Amino acid sequence: SSSSSSSSALKMADEKRPFPTWSFDKHCETMELNTVADVSMSFGDDDSDADLIVIGLYGPPKKDEDEKEEKDDNDDEEVPAPILTGKAKELDSNGLITEILEENYKDFKHGGALGKTTPVMRLSTNGGKTQRIVLLGLGPSESTSDADNENDEEKEGVMAQIGSVLAQQCEEHKKVQTCTLVLPALSAPLKWKDLSTEFYNNLYSDNRFRTKDKIVHKAKDLKSVKIVSEDAAAAADGDELVKGKHLARGVTLTKDIVNAPHNVLNSESLANVARQIAEESNGRITCTILNKDECEERGMGAYLGVARGSETEPQFIHLTYKGAGEIKKKVGIVGKGLLFDTGGYNIKTQMMELMKFDCGGSAAVLGAARAVGELAPEGVEAHFIVAACENMINDRAMVPSDVLTASNGKTIEVLNTDAEGRLTLADALVYADKEVGCDSIIELSTLTGACMISLGKSVCGVWTNNDDLATALKESSAVTGEKSWRMPMEKSYNKQLESKIADMTNLGSRYGGAITAALFLQNFVSPKKPFAHIDIAGTAWNDAAGSATGFGAKMVSEWIARQGK
C-alpha cells in the first residue's frame, strides 16, 4: 500500500540521517555531544613495553646578551656536545641519540627549543619489539640567575605545552597503542592538571557532521599514556591527571556548542544540553529553564525583544552549583547565548557564515558548569545563566527605533539591531543581581569587533571598576593560560549612549565601541556590586582551523574554584 511504502521511505530517511537536525516543519530539539578521548593517563616507573617513548630534555642554559650577540656574528658556530642523563643516556649506548641531537641542533638546541621534537628513532628491544623514540625540548635548563624568577610566563605554560605536543606525537605516529612520557626533574611548576587538560584537548575532533571516510579519529589506536618521572622527589599526583580530564570535558563541550550549525543548535537544543549537564553532575548541579511566559512575568523586555525573531521560543537557562562545606561566596556567571546572529534588520554584509560562534560566551559558561560539576570545588555557590535565542529576521523581529524595557525598568532605544547581544545580557544580569542575589558577577560574550581590533585573536578584554575582581580574573587567566587584559572604563563615553527619547541607546559612536558596550552593561548591575564584562570576540574562534577554541571554560572554572578558598 502507499501508506506502508511511505512509512518505509521515512524510516530509511531517518536511518540515513547522520545527526539530529531540523525537518521542514520542525526545529531540532537535541544536539549530539563529542566525548573526550578514551585514553587512560597514569604515573608509572616502567617504559619497556611502550610503542612510543617521548623523552623530555632540557637544553643548555640561556646565554647572556653579550654571548648571544657574539653567536649571531658567527654563523659557523661549533655544535656543542649534548649532555645526556637518565633515559636518554641509557638509550645512547650506540651514540644514536647524540647523533640525532647534533644533526638537529639548529632547530632543537639539544632540548633548549621548548615544544620542539626530533625526528623519530626506531629501536629494537631485547624482546624483538620495535619502539619509536622521540625527544621533546623542555627549554633551556635553569641557570643560577633564573632560579628566583618564579613568575616567568614561559615556565607557567611548560606543562600545558608538554601535554599538547604529547597528543600531537601520539596522533602523528600511527598504530601507537601505548605511549610513555619520560621527564627529568622539572624546574617548571608541576602542574600535572595542565598537562592532562591540554593532552585531551588536542585530541578533540568534531565528527558529528562528517560521514564515512571524512571522519577523523585522532590517535585512534591509543589506549594508554604513562608518565615516568626521573625525579624521585616529584609529586606523582594521579588525582591531578583526572582533574585535567574533567576540565577537558568542559572545554570539549564549549567547542561543541560553538561548532554546531544553526540547523542543529537553537534555544531549545541548548536548553537540553543544560539539562544534560545537570543530569550528569551526580546531583551537584540543578537546572531551571524559564519559558517565554516566565520571562514576560519578570519584565525581560530587552531579551524578549531580540527573541521575537527566533524560530524557537526563548529559553532562559539557569544552572546552580552548590559546593560542599560552608558557602563563602555566591557568584554569577552570565554568558551571551546568541545561537546565530544575522544582524537582524541591520543585516550583516560580511562574515555571516561565522556567526554561529556568537554563542561563545554561553558555551564557555556551560563548559565551565560541566567542569565545575565534575571538579566539585568546595565553599562556593555558582549560578550559570544564559538567555538563549537567535537574532533573525521575520515579521515579529525588532526593528531600529524600537524602544525596549529591561527587567529593571530602564528603557532602551534600539539604534541598531546588530547590537543585540547586550540587550539579552541586560536582563540576564538583572536576574543574576536581583533575583539570584549573587555577591559578584562576571559575564562573557563575543560582543564587539572593536575588542578584536584592540587585542587581536589571542587576548580577551576585561572591563571592571572593581580592582579586587580584576586581580582575581588576572590570576585565573595567568594560571590557565587563557590570556586577558584589563581595559579602561572611560565614564565620559557614557555620553555616546544618551537617547533623545529613552533612558539610553544600545549603541555608541564609531570609536571606543568595546568600551561603550561595557558601559551599557553596567546599567543592569547594582553600582556597588563587583562586576566584570569579558569580551571574547577575538579568542573564541580559530580561523585557521575553522573551529572553536574552547576559550573561557578554563579561566571561569579556575575563578569559581578560587571563590570558595
Image (spheres, helix red, strand yellow):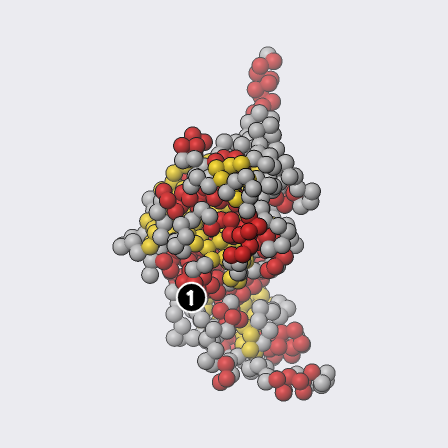
List x then y, in percent, for residue 473. 45, 60
Image position of 169 with respect to 506: above or below: below
Q: Is residue 4 left or right of residue 186?
A: right
List x then y, in percent, for residue 505. 55, 44
List x then y, in percent, for residue 492. 54, 56
Residue at image point 36% right, 42% down: 435
Residue at image point 60% right, 17% down: 5
Q: How many marks?
A: 1
Closest to the observer, 244 or 100 = 244
**Quarter of the figure with the N terminus:** top right
Residue at image point 50% right, 31% down: 313
Residue at image point 42% right, 66% down: 44
Q: Is residue 110 left or right of residue 464?
A: right
Image position of 300 with respect to 371: above or below: above
- Which SS class for mark 1? loop
Q: Residues within 10 Å of mark 1 (few under 14, many from 20)?
A: some
Q: Residue furthest left?
A: 326
Q: Is residue 439 visible?
A: yes
Image position of 265 with respect to 175: above or below: above
Place residue 246 in its image quadrant. bottom left
List x then y, in percent, for residue 420. 56, 42
- Amino acid at dot 1: Gly
Closest to the observer, 41 or 520 = 520
Q: Residue furthest front?
A: 500
Pointer 1: what residue? 44
Place residue 531 in its image quadrant. bottom left
**Quarter of the figure with the C terminus:** bottom left
